[in-house]
Image: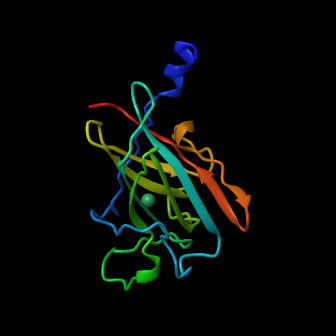
Amino acid sequence: MPVLALAQQCRVTPRDALGPFYVKGAPSQTELCASGSGGSQKLAVSGRVLGTPDCAALAGALVEVWQADSRGDYTQVGAKQDDPGCLLRASLRCDPEGRYSFRTVLPGEYPGRPRHIHYRVSAKGYATLVTQLYFARERGVADALVVKAVPKDGLLAATFDIMLARS
Ligand code: FE
């Protein structure tokens, strides 16, 4: 592969805001809303975590994800009662090929924010990346953070690969 094409492919994923709703230590679960109470539109997200400079697969990378439900509400906020079957948070470990995947419901919009899923991705020897996945091009959002959610077997499927910078 030409060097230039390789360099472009291994471009570090842009950062985005952490936001106020990150909670450390989310459960290890690939189903973020098993009860289905967070919305009716099911979503499957999968991807790989890779590292610069050579796009190496980062086996064992930690992918933390958190999102709002279809109404735009987060769990573990204030005194509100949460559905433990729909925490909409997870900590995921990448497999030997750097792959991760989870199932959830499509997040809703909330005041001032388009639909998004928050990510915090960390791996030994690499700079921790905090970012967000979006479902449509948005003003002020890097194109690299926008996924195409495609209808498939009754749900939406999206792929989101993440490139970390070596620290
Ligand atoms: Fe948010």
Name, please, the residue furthest toward the bottom.
81
- Residue appearing at x 36%, y 83% in the figure: 80
Residue 5 as seen in the image, left or right of residue 100? right
**Which is nearer the eye, 140 or 9?**
9
Where 128 falls versus 135 (above or below)?
above
Ligand 1's image quarter is bottom left
Residue 20 place in picture, x, y as percent: 33, 60
Choose top left, top right, bottom left or bottom right for residue 37: bottom right
**Which is nearer the eye, 34 or 41?**
34
- Residue appearing at x 59%, y 65% in the figure: 106
Name, please, the residue furthest toward the front.
96
Where 4 falls versus 73 (above or below)?
above
**Which is nearer the eye, 109 or 3?**
3
Quarter of the picture containing the N terminus is: top right
Quarter of the picture containing the C terminus is: top left
- Residue appearing at x 46%, y 44% in the figure: 97
Where 163 falls versus 116 (above or below)?
above
Residue 21 place in picture, x, y as percent: 35, 63
Where 74 falls versus 53 (above or below)?
below
Residue 153 as seen in the image, left or right of residue 100? right
Residue 117 place in picture, x, y as percent: 48, 57
- Residue appearing at x 41%, y 44% in the figure: 16
